[in-house]
Image (cartoon, grey):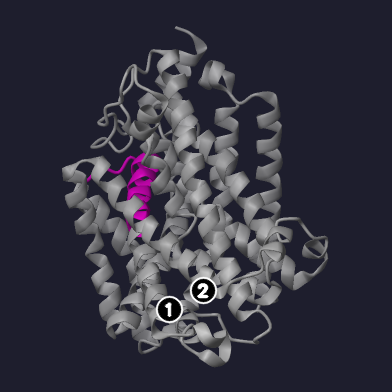
């Protein structure tokens, strides 16, 4: 038995069956088709991954960045997106080559006790992400229909039932729904930015990094917030799993190489869309709110500002506010699907917990909504108090990021595990630089959040 086969068998022994067993290897791909037809067959997982890069947790940070520094932080969004593309390609490659997701691979190389600790950290990160999605969806329902926040939170709980139904219909149905919701989000913000009529020259200059980002403490903290909200740890676990949804011969290196190629194409295309959405958010903040001294720290503030002519001028209208709320609802629904899947992946991979499908997903959802419900009850449904939770969720995300990036870098650089698909030397070095720098920056972000210097 070769070293590579030995390593793969070791992971298999620790795995709780195939990753996301109900969808693993269920999507057929053409054998000898054109590039576009093959790409279409592999398209879909990238959309689910891209959702995490444009979830409600990103919105406030991006729009506030534009309102405070106009377009200067576009360079940060660009850099974050390029880092995301590289990390997601590594995650997909790990899943395709080894047949196991990042949680399963990590558990195979750690003890049971360490596996439980890593599961708790990762579960907290997923909970933090899901809190943003629950809050976004609940606030959107309140803005659109006047529902009390508690009722909105409870309604989001039933999203899991939709996911169960879609899973029964096939994974391609889930992918199609997610793509449609992404189109809604992109269209809304593209339309609102077009109405704002920003200066194209200023936007293009914003993609050139400025030295003041590193010297201005407030600007640096906001830039770190953008990076932290962009690179999401749960997406690495998600992509390493759903990349295996396509059917292929896992003993054929040629088939694996083809799957990696088209999966990375899909991922990069969809992450490019997420990059454009985040740019649109920041541009909207810069075009409409720069220099207005408006308080944009909450979703409701943005909703109210978009219909206030004293803030955004002649383009202000209730329609703009309603479109914003619709996009917020679409983003919350999208992120709900991916957050629930990620919860299932890490639960099975790290602690090998066996339970029925419906129960696994209900538990994952309940873990996220309980803190929000408690907050709503304690503060009487005050939207501002509930949204303050978003600030503290970033701490969990910051802690979990190195827990996912460092193992990913180790495993995808290991030639015994990955064979000829191991990271080339340049990618290995770059991945370690990214892992170390992001870890250091996130520690600084945790310090800033807990000490209150970013308020």
Left or right of residue 286: residue 242:
left
Query: The N terminus is located in which quarter?
Result: top left
Whether residue 100 can be seen here: yes
As displayed, is residue 380 above or below residue 44? below
**Which span of residues is magenta-colored?**
335-355
Left or right of residue 216: residue 167:
left
Q: Position of residue 164 (x, y in %)?
A: 20, 51
As displayed, is residue 252 above or below residue 183? above
Q: Residue at x 68, y 67 (%)?
A: 71
As displayed, is residue 275 above or below residue 380? above
Q: Residue at x 65, y 37 (%)?
A: 431
As displayed, is residue 270 above or below residue 5? below
Q: Residue at x 45, y 37 (%)?
A: 266
Q: Residue at x 43, y 37 (%)?
A: 240
Q: Position of residue 213 (x, y in %)?
A: 77, 63
Q: CB under 8 Å between callouts 2 and 1?
A: yes
For label 2, count other residues whose C-alpha is less than 10 Å away and answer few (under 14), some (14-19) or many (20+).
some
Question: Along the line of sight, which residue is nearer the eye, 432 or 27?
Answer: 27
Residue under label 2: 195
User: Which label was assigned to residue 320?
Assistant: 1
Instruction: Classify residue 13 by image quadrant.
Output: top left
Secondary element at image label 2: helix
Left or right of residue 268: residue 16:
left
**Between discs 2 and 1, the one toward the N terminus:** 2
The chief SS type of the magenta part is helix
């Amino acid at each position: 038995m070769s070293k590579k086969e030995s390593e793969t068998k070791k992971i298999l022994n620790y795995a709780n069956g195939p990753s996301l067993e109900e969808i693993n290897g269920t999507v057929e791909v053409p054998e000898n088709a054109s590039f576009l037809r093959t790409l279409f067959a592999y398209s879909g997982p990238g959309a689910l991954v891209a959702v995490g890069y444009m979830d409600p947790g990103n919105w406030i940070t991006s729009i506030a960045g534009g309102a405070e520094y106009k377009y200067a932080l576009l360079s940060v969004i660009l850099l974050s997106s390029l880092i995301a593309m590289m990390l997601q390609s590594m995650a997909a490659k790990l899943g395709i080559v080894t047949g196991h997701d990042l949680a399963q691979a990590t558990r195979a190389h750690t003890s049971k006790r360490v596996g439980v600790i890593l599961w708790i950290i990762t579960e907290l990160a997923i909970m933090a992400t899901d809190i943003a999605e629950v809050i976004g969806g609940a606030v959107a329902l309140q803005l659109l229909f006047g529902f009390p926040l508690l009722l909105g939170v409870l309604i989001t709980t039933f999203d899991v039932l939709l996911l169960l139904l879609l899973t029964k219909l096939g994974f391609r149905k889930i992918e199609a729904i997610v793509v449609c919701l992404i189109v809604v989000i992109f269209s809304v913000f593209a339309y609102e930015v077009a109405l704002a009529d920003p200066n194209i020259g200023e936007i293009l200059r914003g993609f050139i990094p400025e030295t003041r980002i590193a010297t201005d403490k407030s600007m640096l903290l906001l830039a770190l917030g953008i990076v932290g909200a962009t690179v999401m740890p749960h997406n690495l676990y998600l992509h390493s799993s759903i990349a295996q949804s396509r059917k292929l011969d896992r003993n054929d290196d040629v088939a694996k190489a083809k799957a990696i190629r088209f999966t990375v194409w899909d991922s990069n295309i969809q992450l490019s869309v997420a990059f454009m959405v985040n740019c649109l958010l920041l541009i909207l903040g810069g075009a409409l709110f720069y220099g207005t001294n408006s308080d944009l720290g909450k979703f409701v503030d943005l909703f109210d500002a978009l219909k206030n002519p004293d803030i955004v001028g002649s383009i202000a209208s209730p329609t703009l506010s309603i479109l914003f709320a619709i996009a917020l609802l679409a983003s919350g629904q999208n992120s709900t699907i991916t957050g629930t899947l990620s919860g299932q992946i890490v639960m099975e991979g790290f602690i090998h917990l066996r339970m029925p499908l419906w129960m696994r997903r209900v538990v994952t959802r309940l873990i996220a909504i309980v803190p929000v419900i408690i907050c709503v009850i304690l503060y009487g449904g005050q939207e501002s108090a509930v949204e303050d939770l978003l600030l503290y969720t970033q701490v969990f995300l910051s802690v979990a990021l190195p827990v996912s990036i460092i193992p990913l870098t180790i495993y995808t650089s290991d030639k015994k595990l990955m064979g000829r698909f191991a990271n080339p030397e340049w990618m290995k070095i770059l991945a370690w630089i990214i892992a170390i720098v992001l870890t250091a920056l996130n520690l600084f972000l945790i310090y800033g959040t807990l000490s209150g210097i970013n308020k």
